[in-house]
Structure formats: structure tokens, C-alpha cells
Image (spheres, rainbow, N blue to C red):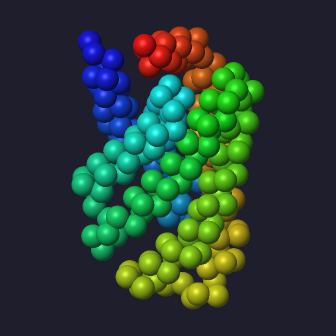
Amino acid sequence: MDRRLSRLSILAAMGALSFILMLFEVPLPFFPPFLKVDAGDLPALLTALLYGPGAGIGIEGIKNVLHYLIRGGDAGLPIGQAANFLAGSVYVSVAAWAYGRRSDAAGLAAGLALGSLLTAVVMAAANYFILFPLYIAVLHYPIAREDILPLILTAIFPFNLVKGGLIGIVAFALYSRLHGWIRERRATEASAERR
């Protein structure tokens, strides 16, 4: 099978798996019920480790487009999917970038930790400047503007740290079983690109 076709098949399968896993979202105790965790970032992360950050971002895109087409969005708008895409893209691209610089367990652990932190920071800013103002303007979300920052500091920021940590723990456990296969696959890809 042609290498590009093989990669495209893997990306399509991982995008579909990511979407399916996204459907099984659960709220976490101590956080508002609209903040939920799902495992949809795991296939994107594994794909990013194999093929680089762009592939992981592509899986995040596939997942969220499918979610919007199947489930719709708030008032017909993909605001939640856009937020999920942004959070997942930051997380997987940072983790894959760090792993690309040091392709071992320590590199992955550092990437997952840095990905969690940067995701929390980016999502705090995105919620403050873009997402909550959109929810208030378009959906008439019942929150006063002066309550946004406290909500971000007490819920959004810590939630993204916890979510990144949970996904990271599962990803690290998967990596411990798949690291040989991932290294072999990356080496095969690298040698094919040099030809």
C-alpha cells in the first residue's frame, strides 16, 4: 500500500475513534457540570506522536467537525467544538513537539506536563476574551461579566490542568506498551521521507 494512502487511512480511523471517544464525556466532581472529560484526545495524541503535531491537530479537527455534524452546537453554532478543538490542539501539539525533541518516556512526560499547563493558560485566555463573551452575546448565558474571571480562576483553569493530567496518565500508560511500535513506525516514516 502506498505510504501516503496508509497514513491517510490511519488518520481517518483515528479521527473516527477520537469522535467516538468524545461522545463518552463525564463531569468531574467539584467542577461545574458543563466541564466534562472525554478520551477523544488520546487518538489525536498517539497520532501526533507518530506523525507530528500537524497530524494530531488534524485528528482534533476531524473529531470536532464530526461532533458538530452529528450533535450540533449551542444555538446551531460550534462554539463548544471550537473550544474543544483549541484545547486539544494545544495539548497534543505541545506534547508531540516535546516528544519530537526527545523521543523517550521523559520527553513525553515533559510534553504532557507542558501541554497541560499551556492548555490551561490558553483556555483561560480564550474563555475570558472570546468564549464567555460569545456565550453571553449569542446564547444569553446567565453570567455577569464580573463573574467571568473568578469562574476561570476557580473552574476553567484548574479543570484543564486536571483534564490534561488525566489524559496524560492514560497516554503515558499506553505509551509504555506501545513505545517500541511508535519508535519503529517513526523510523520507517523518517527513512521513507529521506528517499
> Would residue 28 appear left or right of 70 to someone viewing this image?
right
| Above or below: residue 192 compared with residue 100 | above
Q: Residue shown at 70%/70% (left/top)?
A: 153
| Above or below: residue 105 compared with residue 149 | above
Q: For this rendering, which residue is in front, 177 or 125?
A: 125
Residue 73 lies, in percent from the top left, at 32, 65
> Would residue 34 appear left or right of 172 to someone viewing this image?
left
Q: Give the quarter of the image for residue 12.
A: top left
Residue 66 lies, in percent from the top left, at 29, 48
| Above or below: residue 155 compared with residue 64 | below
Image quadrant where one finds the C terminus? top left
Q: Residue shown at 70%/68% (left/top)?
A: 154
State whether residue 31 appears in this view: no
Q: Residue shown at 64%/88% (left/top)?
A: 146
Q: Residue furthest front?
A: 195
Residue 81 lies, in percent from the top left, at 40, 58
Q: Residue shown at 61%/79% (left/top)?
A: 148
Image quadrant where one finds the N terminus? top left
Instruction: Tally the marks.
Output: 0
Residue 131 lies, in percent from the top left, at 49, 72
State whether residue 179 appears in this view: yes
> Would residue 104 appear left or right of 63 to someone viewing this image?
right
